[in-house]
Image: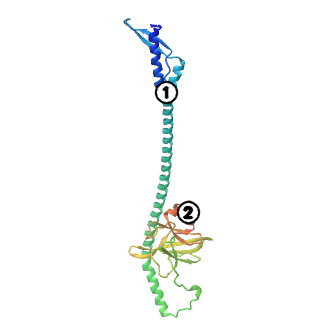
Amino acid sequence: MFHTCSLPSRLWSKHQSDSEAIEETMSVPALTSLDVQSSASGGHVDPIFIANESDVSFMSDLYRPTLIDATTDKERGGTDEEKADSRREAENREAEKLEIERMGIQEMELATREAETREIERIEIEKPEIESQESIVANEAGTKKEPRVSPATNTSKLLRTERKLNKKDLFMGWYKSRGSSELRYPRECIAPKIGDVYVHSCKKEGHPKFQLWVRQISRGMTIWVKAHIFHIHPKLLDRRLTLATTGEPYWSTRLSLSASGSRERAGKIADMILY
């Protein structure tokens, strides 16, 4: 049970002076009333200080900055986590995009290697037959008078066109021919080198078409191998074969092909290639 009592003037004077000292050092307002609680034994009383409403307001103001700082830190932490999540999502999307492009290039490279193998096998099968036919034609030409060959039907060697690759000390050579039908094999060329490209343009069902070959070594022989869009350069492994709508070939870098629109344009040209 609580009892309210009045302190003697001597004690109150001392309490007031102590309160003033505390106020000067800590700026804490003095308590306005004092309750005394009897102990269980009844032998003495314990003073209980009761603050008024202004004291409660002061205490609330005293602790409010700590609560505000804690809330601000929590909000800042949440914002940092959101930024980190956004960065991780962007990195994951970029990694998925690169993985799709890498898989697409691997599929094209695999198709190119399979096509090269088929072409080499075909050449090895047809080579004895072609050599036999050339021998028969040569023997017949030796026994008969050679007919006069007009310039229109003269099968002279094709000249090599040369161009720099991306303004570096690397050059690419290419040959071009034109006809009304497809070629089984490139015509004879002057000084072809490994990495050179042969382009034959013709029409099929009224639509312009192209045939592509690349000069490279295969099974110990330097031959023309049928090629397609994105064919790998035999020496520069970071280069891929592309073709302009005019029929002019280019050895493009993988980085340039990854640029926006480059792969789509090359894909449209691929429909014009006879393979």
* Amino acid marked by disc 1: Tyr
Q: Which mark is residue 262?
A: 2
Between 169 and 227, the residue placed more toward the observer is 169
Secondary structure state at the residue bearing disc 2: helix
Which residue is located at x 52 percent, y 26 percent? 61
Residue 94 coordinates in the image, percent (x, y): 49, 52
**Placement of 141 over or under 117, stated as above or below:** below
User: What residue does disc 1 label?
Assistant: 63
Q: Quadrant location of the N terminus?
A: top left
Residue 140 coordinates in the image, percent (x, y): 48, 90
Q: Residue furthest right?
A: 206
Residue 124 coordinates in the image, percent (x, y): 42, 75
Residue 72 coordinates in the image, percent (x, y): 51, 35
**Placement of 66 over or under 213, stated as above or below:** above
Secondary structure state at the residue bearing disc 1: helix
- Label 1 and label 2: CA atoms lie apart by 64 Å
Between 173 and 120, the residue placed more toward the observer is 173
Q: Is residue 206 left or right of residue 29?
A: right
Crowd tier of the residue under label 1, counting other residues whose Cα lies within 10 Å: few below 14, some 14–19, many 20 or above: few
